[in-house]
Image (cartoon, helix red, strand yellow):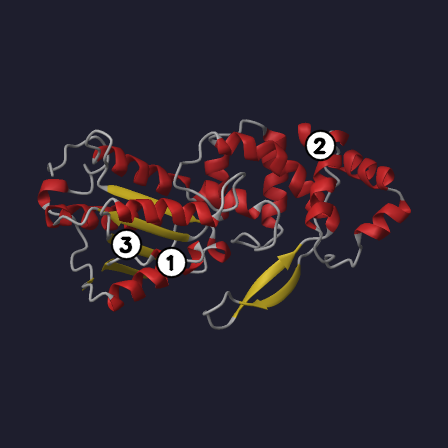
């Protein structure tokens, strides 16, 4: 198992040290590890992993204020440095595999991708008159990831029983469900969990393609997702169809939506300082410009574009 190789563990340690961060529940710091001998620390892990004697420690819980403009706190779960190294080693193995299958509209916590790039994608779509915006917030997404669904998804791509056993050990250490915010593996695993949602949106984009132009664009950053649809009224069916298909995909993942809103807006790009502000910016820009707030009134698409056929190669109305 490549995770057990000393060079993999050493690189994982280097990345963990680069990110710094507070110690876990055992209070052990990077300084303490190196004072006792880094090589000995890595060798112990190297011996424990293949022998199945490795066991992750409990997580240290820390509450921090939610991002600007939000009320309340969110809980960070901080692993020990020892567990961060093991998670990091597993991430070094899994991330290149998953990256090959991730979709173009996924931007959160991926190599060479950023929130600013997500904003650019959305801004470009709005310049192209995709100004009907469907904004989704997923309810406590990281806290509610279903482990059995996650493991099934990973197993379809990773055919290695040792890797799967280690992954299950690390994930189950967080509890009966959820991924810890603060865990090294959580970002890549959460993106893999939502990858089928992204794939559906990519199919929707291709289904509506007319030459170089598509009637739909989307961008997702972790658990925030924005879908943009062409402003022409003849594409009312499309926003309803996307809304329905998103409900179906998220229901399969047992993911709840905190709020879902659709707005027609005039984009004020200068107000979008980052992707996190995007949904509120779109909403406020819509109101400020006199735009009409459109509430979804139907749970299903029109008969001409029933959800079972939409985005699976069925034809769509022409512009």
Taking 225 as reference, is 231 left or right? left
**Of the image marks 3 and 2, the number of the one nearer the N terminus:** 2
197 above or below 80? above
The extreme bottom residue here reads: 71
Tell me the residue at 53%/30% (across/down).
97
Question: Which residue is at the front of the view, 243 or 132?
Answer: 132
Front residue of 183/153: it is: 183
Total numbered labels placed on residues in the image: 3
Q: CA distance from mark 1 to mark 2?
A: 43 Å
Give the residue at mark 3.
134
Specify the quadrant of the image occupied by residue 313.
top left
Residue 270's tag is 1
Give the mark nearer the N terminus: 1 vs 3: 3
**Disc 3 versus disc 2: distance between alpha carbons?**
42 Å
- Give percent across and percent down for residue 198: 37, 41
Height in image: 260 above or below 213?
below
The residue under the point 18% across, 36% down is 309
- The residue to which callout 2 is attached is 8
The x, y position of residue 249, in whole percent, is: 32, 45
Q: Is residue 117 visible?
A: yes
Residue with the most extreme front position: 270
């Amino acid at each position: 198992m490549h995770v057990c190789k000393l060079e993999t563990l050493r690189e994982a340690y280097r990345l963990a040290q680069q990110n710094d961060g507070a110690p876990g529940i055992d209070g052990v710091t990077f300084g303490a590890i190196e004072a006792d001998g880094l090589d000995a620390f890595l060798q112990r892990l190297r011996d424990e992993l293949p022998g199945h004697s490795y066991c992750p420690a409990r997580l240290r819980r820390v509450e921090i204020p939610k991002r600007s403009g939000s009320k309340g706190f969110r809980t960070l779960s901080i692993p020990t440095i020892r567990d961060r190294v093991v998670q990091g080693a597993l991430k070094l193995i899994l991330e290149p595999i998953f990256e090959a299958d991730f979709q173009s509209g996924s931007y959160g916590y991926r190599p060479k991708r950023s929130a600013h790039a997500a904003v650019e994608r959305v801004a470009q779509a709005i310049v192209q008159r995709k100004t009907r915006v469907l904004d989704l917030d997923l309810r406590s997404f990281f806290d509610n990831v279903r482990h059995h669904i996650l493991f099934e998804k990973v197993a379809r791509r990773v055919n290695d029983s040792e890797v799967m056993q280690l992954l299950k050990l690390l994930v189950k250490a967080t509890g009966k469900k959820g991924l810890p915010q603060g865990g090294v593996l959580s970002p890549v695993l959460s993106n893999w969990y939502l990858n089928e949602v992204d794939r559906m949106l990519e199919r929707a984009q291709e289904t509506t393609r007319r030459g170089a132009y598509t009637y739909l664009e989307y961008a997702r950053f972790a658990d925030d997702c924005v879908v943009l649809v062409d402003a022409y009224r003849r594409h009312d069916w499309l926003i309803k169809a996307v809304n329905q298909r998103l409900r179906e995909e998220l229901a399969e993942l047992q993911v709840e939506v905190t709020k879902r809103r659709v707005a027609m807006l005039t984009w004020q790009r200068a107000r979008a300082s980052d992707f996190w502000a995007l949904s509120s910016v779109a909403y406020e820009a819509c109101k400020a410009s006199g735009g009409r707030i459109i509430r979804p009134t139907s749970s299903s698409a029109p008969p001409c574009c029933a959800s079972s056929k939409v985005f699976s190669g069925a034809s769509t109305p022409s512009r």
